[in-house]
Amino acid sequence: MLFQVIVNGLLMGGVFALIAVGLTMIHGVMKIVNFAQGDFLAMGLFMTYGLYAFMPEHSMPYWLILPVAAGMYLFGMIVFRFAIKRVLNTGDSNYILLTIGLSFMIQNLLQLIYGADFRSIPVSDTFRMGSWEFLGAMFPISRIVAFAAAAIFVVFVNWFLTKTDIGRAMRATAENRAVAESLGIRGGRVYVTAFAIGTMFAGISGLLISPVQMIFPTAGVPFGLVAMSAMVLGGLGNIKGALLGGLIIGLVESFTSTYVNIALAPVAVNLVLVLVLIFKPYGLLGKRRRTA
Amino acid sequence: MVHNEVSGEKKKVFEVVELDKSFAGVHAVNKFSFDVYEGEILGLIGPNGCGKSTSVNLMTGVYKQDSGSIIYYAADGTKHTLERQSPPMRARMGIGRTFQTPKPFSDMTVFDNIFAVAMLYNKSLKEARNVTEEIIEFAGFRQIAGEKSTKLPIEKRKWMDMTRVLATKPRILMLDECLAGLTPSEIEESLEIVRKINRRGITILFIEHVMSAVANLCERVVVMLEGKFLTEGIPANVMKEPEVIKAYLGEDYAV
Amino acid sequence: MAVETFRKNMLAIVLFIVFLAAAAVFPFVFGNRYLNRVAIDILFFAAMGNAWNIIGGYGRQTSWASATFFAIGAYTSIMLFLHFETSPFISMWPGMVLAVLMAVVIGLPCFRLRGVYFAIATIAMATISRQLLVYFSDFTGGNLGLSFPIIGPANPLYGPANLLFSDFLLRPYYFIALGWMAVTVVIVWVIEHRMLGYHLRAICDDQDAAESLGIKSSVVKLKAFIISAMMLSFTGTLYVFMLRIVDPETFASHEMSVRIAIVAILGGMGTKFGPLVGALVTIPLLEISNNYLADLGHGGAGWVLYGLLIVVIVLFRPNGIVSLFDSAKSLLARNAGKGKSGGEAGGA
């Protein structure tokens, strides 16, 4: 039983990690917390839902990854160009208001277009119900695929940031934009790429959970909170930390659902966030930033 | 407990002993010791990056030292060992400072900049207003008292920084490289303001790396190099020491 | 300097007094319950916007838990009334105490850190509170909430002591709302002109400088947050006795927090009259779009507009509608009285 709880937690935690990593990339490079990250996930869900209608019956939604990823990347670029860019470096409250306003808009636009009814993607029952048994625990296939895909993306991010030019440019810009620019790195392009990737990851997370997630306008809200919790838990701007944070939150949610009360699972997740803020605001892996 | 550290005739304000601080492998302040005596204008000099500002930040509580002690003798004679006290707490003890770049409260007028501080250190708003008026007179700000501080030219912003801190009734004022970007006549005026402040009984710790200003102003200087104490004495003597010349100008100039 | 501030604000003060006079007459002009109800909402939201402004506008620490404090006041009062017939004048105190406690729990850790931590923490706290309100349904009535029926003049509980009136046109509640709104403006005014207001501005302008001068920024922010929380809780108490019903969706939702914040954001953060202007614009906007755009899609077009408004304000007019007045004023001033202090101090 315990093993099952852990498995459940880690499988879900993998997806949490992916959306948290997206959020962390954005924060790491441009020092803003994207309060609309959860709603970007919801957009991914709805995109998947909308495009799925064109697919042959009972097929797997994962084939839609290309259009969803591309669509969300493009959306991220547009949002950055017309909104985010203008509030960078204008103080904390501006971007907070902007992204919360965006979040509110997206939720209610989805509501306007689709209504509040719960929808779902009609995948085949074998896929929805199917699971492997291993060491006494059930591993639902859909969740394994989600976890595996999330893991692949996280590995990709690590490679991207360490081995590619633009990834390294991102890290340099995150450290010190002025210096990076003096070295010839064009800050503007780095910023928009980071934001677009972060947006894309949220959308992909939506796609990955679409077979098992109820689809409705505010479906992304808990994930947005989870992403923020995971990011704070792992230390703002720290990719590995976000990964760890996502897994931990997944475990917290799983344990609370099983051993306490499923209704209190969201409370537990938010409580973790509050406790981290009180006792370890720089996160488990984060470093205290120099003042002055 | 009243506790006087007497050296000759003078009382100490600060006693810094073996102060040590590193940042990510850079040993910014290296077992640095020096004393500040009441009423003096002490220069803390040294080439760029030698740890002067870090020392000030340690003394004012912006950073916490890795090791070493900072002892402060308040106006009433009490002895304080400074380690965990936050910058606001130290300011309220009478430790005042300015920053390398001017930091006005941009949205406020010159008057309000000073008034906002005076409110904290006076029992009634009326008293605070009086204190503010007095500082405005002292600084010669009567004409610009109603100006938004962002509209001020740089030298006035620096002078406002220096005089605003007077509202905290400081015992010591640490001026961190306050002459950057000023014309020679503005430098002269700044030094005069510093002397005026000193004449009110406020000890001055003057951090600078421009020698000529220091020579004009300071009775005594302490020289730092690479985070360590190098030498101290009166400016005329210190500036002739070969080690000091080498530190500033390189090997070639040492005689 | 007090004289100077008075002169600067003269126009605003005059307009405010004119507004109050007009408002005092309003409920008698149309004799329409619906219009009065909307007007009451405008006034209550203006009051709550003023409360939000103290920490969110003057302090630049955006709070997204306003609804939580509002709900605390409402739930505490209605629960005490239902069980013990407690008068709102008494039950408002435990509500405010609870609100202060929550404010301290969130504020103490967060105000040492960057502003975004506070925003995140308020969202987390608001979410937890809402879920707990639903979870402990035995006490709180869960999703359905709590309510009490109309209490008529025959009932001994009826009367001003319990803020229970039976006027169909809701006029007593209107004047309560008007009075409270005016009081909140005065509270903000007082704060602006005393130490708390000055220190809030100093911290927002340059926190490092403020701290080097002895201003403890976390303490200042906490004070502002506590005052804000108390005001919101008090409003909740007043509101629930008018509405006679409380439920998590109306009182404790994220929508509610956004509604409260947007009143100040749109109207003018860090200004005395911004929230009133903001309420005058946003509440009717929501009503109109709910009525006329209800058929658009699945409904909720008004909320989309709210979100869009926030985005537009932040991008183009971060100082809110009130700043339009300021720009107009300075345009007029420049044309009217040329050069008393023109170019004296030189460029920066």
Image (tube, rainbow, N blue to C red):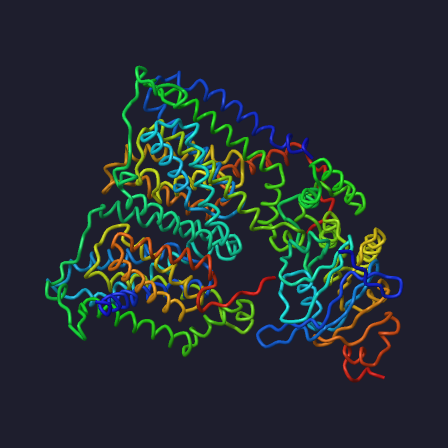
Whether residue A189 is visible: no
* Residue A107 placement (x, y as % from top left): 31, 49
**Residue under the point 78% across and 53% down:** B75
Number of dots carrying numbers: 0
**Residue under the point 56% across and 29% down:** C12
Q: Up-down: is C217 above or below A73?
A: above
| Residue A54 picture quarter | bottom left
Q: Is residue A140 left or right of residue C152?
A: left
Q: Quadrant of the N terminus of chain A?
A: bottom left
* Residue B30 placement (x, y as % from top left): 68, 75
**Residue under the point 25% across and 38% down:** C144
| Residue B22 picture quarter | bottom right
* Residue B64 placement (x, y as % from top left): 62, 65
Q: Up-down: is A2 above or below C53?
A: below
Q: Is residue C141 left or right of residue C59?
A: left
Decide which of C93, A71 is in the foreground and name it: C93
Q: Quadrant of the C terminus of chain A?
A: bottom right
* Residue A29 placement (x, y as % from top left): 46, 65
Decide which of B93, B127 is in the foreground and name it: B93
Whether residue C293 is visible: yes
Decide which of B97, B141 is in the foreground and name it: B97
Decide which of B108, A281 is in the foreground and name it: A281
Q: Is residue A49 left or right of residue C212?
A: left
